[in-house]
Image: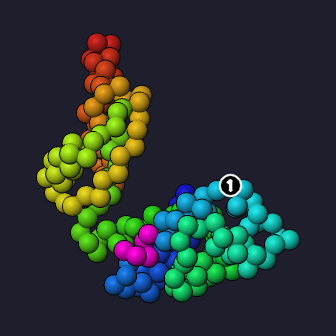
Amino acid sequence: MAEIATIARPYAEALFKAAGADAAGASAWLEELAAVASNEQLRQFADNPKFTAEQVYGVIAGVLKTALPVIGQNFLRTVLDNGRLSALPEIAAQFRALVNAQRGSSDAVVYSAFDIDAAALADLAAALEKRFGRKLDVQVRLAPELIGGVRVVVGDEVLDTSVKARLEQMKVALTA
C-alpha cells in the first residue's frame, strides 16, 4: 500500500493547493469520485486499452450525482490521463487528512453494535473530543459482532469499550 500512498500524495497536495479556500467543497466531490473509482467494474473498464481516457471520463461524469466544477473536471482528466484511477480513493483519504490538518480536526469512526441516535451521538462526540483533545468528524458504522459498546478509531489510536473486547480480555486473564 505504500506505493499507492506514494502515488497519491502529489495529487492530493496539488489539489489541496489548487482548491485553496474551497477545500471543503473539493473534499465533497473528491469523496464522490473516490466512491465511484472504487468500483471494480469501472476500474476494469478504465484499464481496457480499447477505451480512451475521454470515454472513461464520460462514464464517470455520467455516474456522478452532482456535476463536477471546472477544477474537478481538470483533476479527473489529469488522473485518467496518467492512469491513476485506482489511486483515487487514497488521493481522497490524503486530501481529507490535509483538510483536517488545516482545520485542526481528525476523522473518527465509531463502530457500534446498534444504531446511535442523534442526541447520544452528540454526547459521545463531545466526550471523544475531550478524550482525544481535538475536534472530531464522527462517522458511525454498524458492527454487530461487537455485541455492545463502541470501538472508536481516530487515526492510529483505538479506544475499544465493546463487550467483545472485554470478553477477550477476560479470556486472556482466565487462560494466563
26 in magenta: yes
13 in magenta: no
The three-letter code of the residue at mark 1 reads: Glu
Quadrant that contains the C terminus:
top left
Look at 72% across and 56% down and name the residue there. Answer: 41
Counting from the top left corner in percent of width and height, residue 117 is at 27, 42
Quadrant that contains the N terminus:
bottom right
Give the magenta range: 24-28
In this view, the residue in front, 89 or 41, is 41
In the displayed structure, 28 sits above or below 15; it is: above
Q: Is residue 176 visible?
A: no
Relative side of 27 to 124, left or right: right
Look at 61% across and 63% down and name the residue there. Answer: 37
| Residue at mark 1 | 40
In the displayed structure, 114 sits above or below 23; it is: above
Looking at the rendered structure, the secondary structure element under dot 1 is helix
Counting from the top left corner in percent of width and height, residue 25 is at 40, 76
Magenta span: chief secondary structure: helix
In this view, the residue in front, 122 or 145, is 122
Counting from the top left corner in percent of width and height, residue 97 is at 37, 67
